[in-house]
Amino acid sequence: MSGANANRWYHATAIFSVVFALAGFSYNVWRMEASEHNNSVREASFEILLQLADLEQLVYAAHYDKDPEAGNPRAGWVKVALIADLSTQTSDTVQQQAAGLREVWGQNWSGMHSDRSAADSIVAAIDVVRAGVRERLNNLE
């Protein structure tokens, strides 16, 4: 092999190595960002599921147990607002479902103690959000 030919192979190898290193670095950065996004969605989703369970328990305590402390609507408002806030970290669908829950809660919280249909409406809205969150978790990258 002549010196000029060896020099070309050296440059080609060096260029290929740089391109390969940049491609690997770019993929690694993308993967880390995707993993971080998935972790954020996962954490928000799990917290939403916990808040939904607490809200459902609050509705049951208010309606079936007639417990004004465990079924306190002010605590329900806080949970509904937190669910709506956390939903912004999940997906547009879950965000819309959380907004729907907030609307249903706003229309029915005052009747949940005595009106079964009000309590059932709130629980149905909770179930919609819960299903949306589970679907979002199942579709993580």
Image: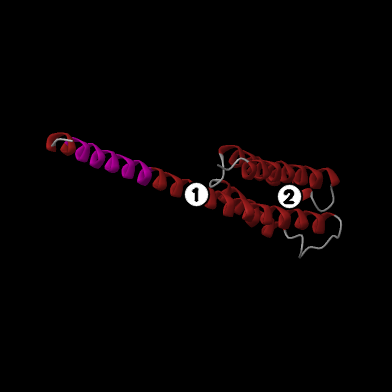
User: In the image, is residue 18 part of the stretch drawn in magenta?
Assistant: yes
In terms of image quadrants, where is residue 20?
top left
- Residue at image position (81%, 59%) is 61
Residue 47 located left or right of residue 38: right
- Between marks 1 and 2, how big is the CA–CA gap? 38 Å
Which label belongs to residue 55? none
In terms of image quadrants, where is residue 101?
top right
The single residue placed furthest to the front in the displayed view is 1
The percent position of residue 50, horizontal first and vertical second, equals 68, 56
What secondary structure prevails in the magenta region? helix
Q: Residues within 10 Å of mark 1 (few under 14, many from 20)?
A: some
- Residue at image position (58%, 54%) is 43
The label nearer to you, 1 versus 2, is 1
Q: Quadrant of the C terminus?
A: top right
Which label belongs to residue 35? 1
User: In the image, is residue 121 part of the stretch drawn in magenta?
Assistant: no
The percent position of residue 9, horizontal first and vertical second, equals 22, 37
Between 34 and 9, the one nearer to me in the picture = 9
Q: Amino acid at mark 2?
A: Trp
- Mark 1 and mark 2 lie on one chain; the one further toward the N terminus is 1
Mark 1: secondary structure:
helix
Please name the residue that numbered disc 2 is placed on: 109
- Residue at image position (79%, 48%) is 111
Which segment did they paint magenta? 8-26
Question: Quick check: marks 1 and 2 in contact, CB under 8 Å?
Answer: no
